[in-house]
Image (cartoon, grey):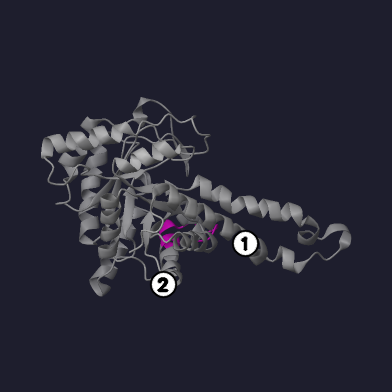
C-alpha cells in the first residue's frame, strides 16, 4: 500500500484508541532498517509507524553531509516506493526535535510538506515531534501552538512532549528525577494551549517515569496510573465529549518495561510507543554472530582470499533484517496491534 494518507493515519489512530491497542513507532537509520521495520509490520498484520530522529536523519543524508532535511526527504522518498509493495499502512514520523534544531529539521520539513500538499494534496510526513522538554512548560506550549498551526495547514499531526524523559538519546540527556512525572495540572495546561482537536490534532508524550536507554525490567520506576489521572482531570474539566481518554498519548523510553506496565499504558490512552534501543540490538546482534562464526570467510586470514558469499553485505544483512523484523512483530504483539490491519 502507499504511505498512509492523512485520512488513513487519522483512521489508524482512531482505531487504536477505540480498540485499546497501540502502534510501535520504529526508529530507522538506513534502507536496511526501514525494510526490516516494514517487513515486521507486514508479518504481524499490523499497520505501523516508521520514524527518524535528528541523528538518524543526519546519518541518512550521508555521514559527511549531515543534513537532517535531506536525510529525512531521502527516507520518505525511498519509503514511498518500497512500502507500496506491502499490504499494511505505514506512516512516516520525525522523532525528538529540540528547540535548537527546529529551524534545521521540523520547520523546513513542514514547509516542504505544505508545498507538496498544495501541488498533490498530500504531505510528505504524517506527523512530526516537537520536544520541548528542555524548556519551561509555558515556552514549550507557546512553540507548540505555532507548530500546531503549521502542521494543521499541511494536514499533519504534531507530537508534543509534556514532561521529561530521562536518560540520553541522540545527544539529548536528562537527569532521572521528579521531572519524569507529568502532573494533571501540566495536562490541563496543554489542553488550554492546544485545545482538543479544534486547533489541529496532536499526540502528547506525557511522562510517567520514562527513561531512554537500556534497562532491565524493574530498574525503571514507571507509574502508568499518571496517564489515567491526566485523562480524568481533562474529562472532569471539559466533559466527556471527547471520550474517557481525550488525549492521544505516546509512550517514550519503554526499554525494560514490564508487560503489565505496557498494557496499563495502552489502556489509559497510549496509541503510539517508540521502539528504538531494542530494535537496534535485534539488528546488530546477528551481525556480530555472523562475523564471529564466519570470521575466516569474512576476513582474509593468513593471506587467503576469504569467502565472498560470507562478506557480501547482503549475507549478514539478511540475518540482521530478519531479526529486527521479528522484534517488530514482538512489539506489535505486546501492544496488541498485531492482526488489526483493516
Q: Is residue 126 above or below residue 21?
A: below
Percent across and percent down for residue 276 are: 48, 48
Q: Residues within 10 Å of mark 1 (few under 14, many from 20)?
A: some
Q: Return the residue nearer the eye: 122 or 4.
A: 4
> From the image, which quarter does the C terminus lie in?
bottom left
Q: Return the residue nearer the eye: 194 or 25.
A: 25
Q: Earlier in the sequence, mark 1 or mark 2?
A: 2
Percent across and percent down for residue 305 are: 83, 66
Give me the residue at 27% from left, 40% from top.
Answer: 140
Percent across and percent down for residue 17 are: 27, 50
User: Is mark 1 in CB contact (under 8 Å) with mark 2?
Assistant: no
Residue on which the image places disc 2: 84
Quadrant of the rendered structure where residue 188 is?
top left
Kindly report the distance in space between the C-alpha atoms of the residues bearing marks 1 and 2.
22 Å
Does the magenta portion include 67?
yes
Label 2: element kind: loop
Number of marks present in the image shown: 2
Percent across and percent down for residue 227 are: 29, 36
Q: Is residue 137 above or below residue 28?
A: above
- Magenta residues span 61-72
Label 1: element kind: helix
Q: Which mark is residue 317?
A: 1
Give me the residue at 20% from left, 35% from top.
Answer: 232
> From the image, which quarter does the N terminus lie in?
bottom left
Quadrant of the rendered structure where residue 112 is?
bottom left
Looking at this rendering, what residue extends furthest in the right direction?
302
Taking the image as shown, residue 39 lies to the left or right of residue 131, namely right
Give me the residue at 36% from left, 35% from top.
Answer: 164
Amino acid at each position: 500500500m502507499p504511505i498512509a494518507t492523512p485520512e488513513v493515519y487519522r483512521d489508524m489512530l482512531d482505531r487504536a484508541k477505540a480498540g485499546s491497542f497501540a502502534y510501535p513507532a520504529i526508529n530507522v537509520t538506513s534502507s536496511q532498517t526501514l525494510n526490516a521495520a516494514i517487513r515486521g509490520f507486514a508479518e504481524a498484520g499490523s499497520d505501523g509507524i516508521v520514524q527518524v530522529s535528528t541523528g538518524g536523519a543526519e546519518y541518512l543524508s550521508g555521514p559527511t553531509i549531515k543534513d537532517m532535511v535531506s536525510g529525512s526527504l531521502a527516507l520518505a522518498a525511498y519509503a514511498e516506493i518500497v512500502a507500496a509493495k506491502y499490504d499494511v499502512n505505514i506512516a512516516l514520523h520525525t522523532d525528538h526535535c529540540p528547540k535548537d534544531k527546529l529551524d534545521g529539521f521540523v520547520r523546513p520539513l513542514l514547509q516542504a510538506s505544505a508545498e507538496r500538499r498544495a501541488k498533490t494534496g498530500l504531505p510528505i510526513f504524517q506527523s512530526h515531534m516537537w520536544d520541548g522538554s528542555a524548556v519551561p512548560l509555558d515556552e514549550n506550549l507557546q512553540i507548540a501552538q505555532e507548530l500546531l498551526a503549521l502542521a494543521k495547514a499541511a494536514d499533519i499531526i504534531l507530537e508534543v512532549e509534556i514532561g521529561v524523559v530521562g536518560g540520553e538519546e541522540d545527544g539529548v540527556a536528562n537527569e532521572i528525577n521528579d521531572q519524569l512525572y507529568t502532573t494533571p495540572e501540566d495536562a490541563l495546561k496543554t489542553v488550554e494551549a492546544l485545545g482538543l482537536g479544534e486547533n489541529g490534532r496532536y499526540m502528547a508524550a506525557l511522562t510517567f517515569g520514562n527513561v531512554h536507554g537500556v534497562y532491565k525490567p524493574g530498574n525503571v520506576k514507571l507509574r502508568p496510573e499518571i496517564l489515567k489521572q491526566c485523562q480524568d482531570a481533562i474529562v472532569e474539566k471539559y466533559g466527556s465529549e471527547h471520550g474517557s481518554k481525550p488525549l492521544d498519548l505516546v509512550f517514550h523510553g519503554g526499554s525494560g518495561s514490564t508487560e503489565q506496565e505496557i498494557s496499563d499504558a495502552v489502556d489509559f490512552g497510549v496509541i503510539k510507543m517508540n521502539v528504538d534501543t531494542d530494535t537496534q540490538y535485534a539488528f546488530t546482534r546477528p551481525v556480530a554472530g555472523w562475523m564471529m562464526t564466519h570470521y575466516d570467510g569474512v576476513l582474509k586470514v593468513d593471506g587467503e582470499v576469504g569467502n565472498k558469499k560470507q562478506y557480501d553485505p547482503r549475507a549478514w544483512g539478511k540475518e540482521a533484517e530478519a531479526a529486527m523484523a521479528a522484534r517488530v512483530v514482538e512489539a506489535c504483539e505486546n501492544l496488541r496491534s498485531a492482526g488489526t490491519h483493516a
